[in-house]
Amino acid sequence: LVASPSLSGSLLRIPFAAWVDTTGGKKPFVVLLVMSILGMGGLLAVIHWLPLLGSAQSSLAFGALFALGTLVGCGAAAFSVGIGQVSYWFPQRRQGRVLAMFAGVGNLAPGLVSLGLPYLLRDGGLQGAYSIWLLVLVLASALYCLLGHNAPYFQLRRQEYSSAEARCVASGTHGQELFPSEDAVASLRLAAGSSRTWALVVVYFTTFGGLVALTSWLPVYWAKFHGAEAILAGRLTALFSLSASLLRIFPGGLLADAIGGLPALIPALLALAAGAAALAASEGFERAAAGQMGVALGMGLANAAVFKLVPQEIPTAVGGATGWVSGL
């Protein structure tokens, strides 16, 4: 039940990221946000009505929560759409920092939720906490609908420019450097045919997949292994998640632009390995906290380096490559 939104949010990244190469990012982004809003609204309705169903609630609860949780998770797939959309907007020399900014600020959410959710649950109950979450989601979606735009090439194609004309104008007038294959299946196939895509999949599976997994697991770890109260465990988890996200922006993105994706990635993975070893071997609270922060440092820097490398290593199928890397 807990895994369902994570799985839908991960697996849908693959086709939706490839969709960016055909229409630009705005349409798939909006579709995913609407699906997530519908799921959250449904969860609120279930929370309200389920206690009124009496003995029938247990047989209905799991199926309803599973389906709606899966729908809510669709919003997480917007990450890969945004990576593709941002990649087409900016020249390659700036992509390390802008992609790190997009992903890093976006990834602050798990840390902020870990920090604030215990207080929201205490003061407003489950229904109050979910209502605030739904309100934030609706407002953010409305803001994106108003302000979000596709890269110049996609805007020109909507104005019925030919592909060649759109490339010429977008490149010469607007400075766009990357251009899509315009076929979602072809983009996925082209990206899948590159060994570099799969190398980045393995790295990102470890670094960002590990970040998501640890954000879910660390509250249990601090409570069960170190006897921390729920609010303290939430604060420590928030410190981990927020640190990894902020380090992805600074110095992660700037470092990747300055020295290149691969030279930035290697020391980041070494820092991650050292932090993980310290966390696994430590029994005391202080050493465990230090190990946790070492893991956060390595993951933050590595995540920035990976998406500096995606448009650099697979420039003709950015959407497809982003889907494989971020989805798997």
Image: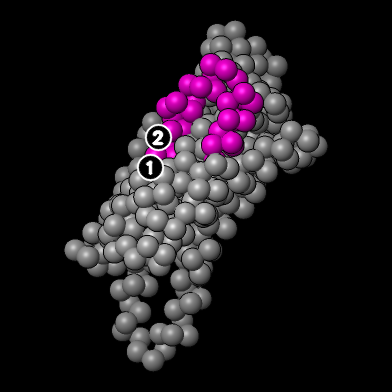
Residue 168 pos. (x, y %): 65, 11
Quarter of the figure with residue 302: top right
Name the side, left or right, on which 293 lies relative to 15. left
Q: Residue at x 44, y 78 (%)?
A: 61
**Prevailing secondary structure class for the magenta stretch in the rendered image:** helix
Residue 130 pos. (x, y %): 31, 61
Q: Are marks 1 and 2 in contact (CB under 8 Å)?
A: yes
**Residue 255 in magenta?**
yes
* 26 or 243: nearer the viewer: 243
**Count of picture labels:** 2
Which mark is drawn over residue 138? none
Q: Residue at x 34, y 58 (%)?
A: 233
Residue 305 seen anywhere in this rendered image of the structure = yes
Q: Secondary structure at mark 1?
A: helix
Between the residue at mark 1 and the residue at mark 2, the CA separation in whole angstroms equals 6 Å
Name the side, left or right, on which 193 lies relative to 124. right
Q: Residue at x 63, y 21 (%)?
A: 178
Q: Which residue is mark 1?
A: 242
Q: Is residue 39 above or below residue 306?
A: below
Q: Is residue 50 above or below residue 186?
A: below
Quarter of the figure with residue 265: top right
Q: Which residues are magenta?
A: 243-272
* 323 or 231: nearer the viewer: 231
Which mark is drawn over residue 246? 2
Specify the amino acid type for callout 2. Leu
Residue 76 seen anywhere in this rendered image of the structure = no
Q: Residue at x 78, y 34 (%)?
A: 194
Crowd tier of the residue under label 1, counting other residues whose Cα lies within 10 Å: few below 14, some 14–19, many 20 or above: many
Specify the amino acid type for callout 1. Leu
Quarter of the figure with residue 321: top right
* 216 or 25: nearer the viewer: 216
